[in-house]
Image: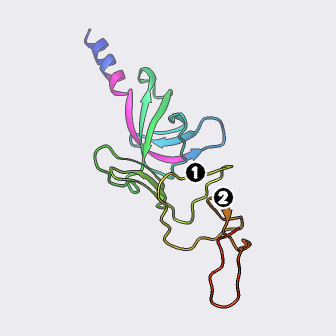
Amino acid sequence: MNDMLRDLGSRVMMMFSRGVLRSVNDAGPRQQVQVELLKNELRDGLEHMQNYGFTSHPRGGDCAVAFTGGNREQGIVLLIDDRRYRIPLLAGEVAIYDDLGNKVELLREMVKITAVQHVEVAAPTIKLVGDLEVVGNINTTGTITNNGKNIGSTHQHGGVTGGSGNSGAPV
């Protein structure tokens, strides 16, 4: 009986482990990772499960690994975290971030996007609801309209008079 309990206890203890990420293979439909677990226990080809709609290619960090039935040959990496880049948050806040400093923060008072280089949005149309404040220049290669009237460099005015008089509104 003691041997059975000892075996069961050993299997339970072997079901979960903490490890250090050593490498990532992101080529296939499922990300495979190499993790160093206990001293000199290197596991290669472990599947890194990721939440639907979210994916990442971690450069390093700590891992939580589960082993089905305590079998160390059947590991699944449940999560990978790299505390070197983690940003502090208040209760209820959420963030997406990387190792370069790019981040999207859902903060208590605002949504804040920080890009190291630039932000690119590709869509047939973009609609902003609310006041727009721009700090910096606006460059455009298209038409600028206000209330349906062209106000860009090619717009025309009616009632133009010479001298210091005012012209009419844009046509």
Asked whether, in this view, residue 127 is left or right of residue 101, the answer is right
Residue 135 percent location from the top left of the image: 48, 71
Q: Helix, strand, or loop for circle 2?
A: loop
Query: Considering depth in this image, is 97 or 147 the residue closer to the camera?
Result: 147
Q: In the displayed image of the protein, which residue is found farthest to the top?
A: 1
Q: Is residue 58 shown left or right of residue 126?
A: left
Q: Are marks 1 and 2 in contact (CB under 8 Å)?
A: no
Please name the residue that numbered disc 2 is placed on.
148
Instruction: In the rendered view, tell whether residue 131 sits above or below residue 77.
Output: below
> Is residue 105 or residue 81 the one in the foreground?
105
Q: Residues within 10 Å of mark 2 (few under 14, many from 20)?
A: few
- Residue at the image point whose x is 31% and y is 43% from the top: 92
Q: Is residue 59 visible?
A: yes
For residue 68, above or below residue 103: above
Using the numbered discs, state the Cα–Cα distance from disc 1 to disc 2 in whole angstroms.
Answer: 15 Å
For the N terminus, the quadrant is top left
> Residue placed at 51% from the left, 65% from the top?
116
Which element is circle 1 on? loop
Reading the chain from its start, which is encountered first: label 1 or label 2? 1
The amino acid at mark 2 is Gly
**Residue extent of the magenta highlight:** 10-23
* Residue 81, image x, y percentages: 41, 46
Question: Would residue 19 be counted in the magenta stretch?
Answer: yes
User: From this viewpoint, which residue is outermost toward the bottom?
Assistant: 163
Q: Residue at x 52, y 73 (%)?
A: 136
Tell me the tag on residue 127. 1
Viewport quadrant of the C terminus? bottom right
Residue 31 picture quarter = top right
Residue 101 image offset from top left, x and y in percent: 46, 61
In the foreground, 117 or 125? 125
**Of 71 and 157, the residue lying toward us:** 157
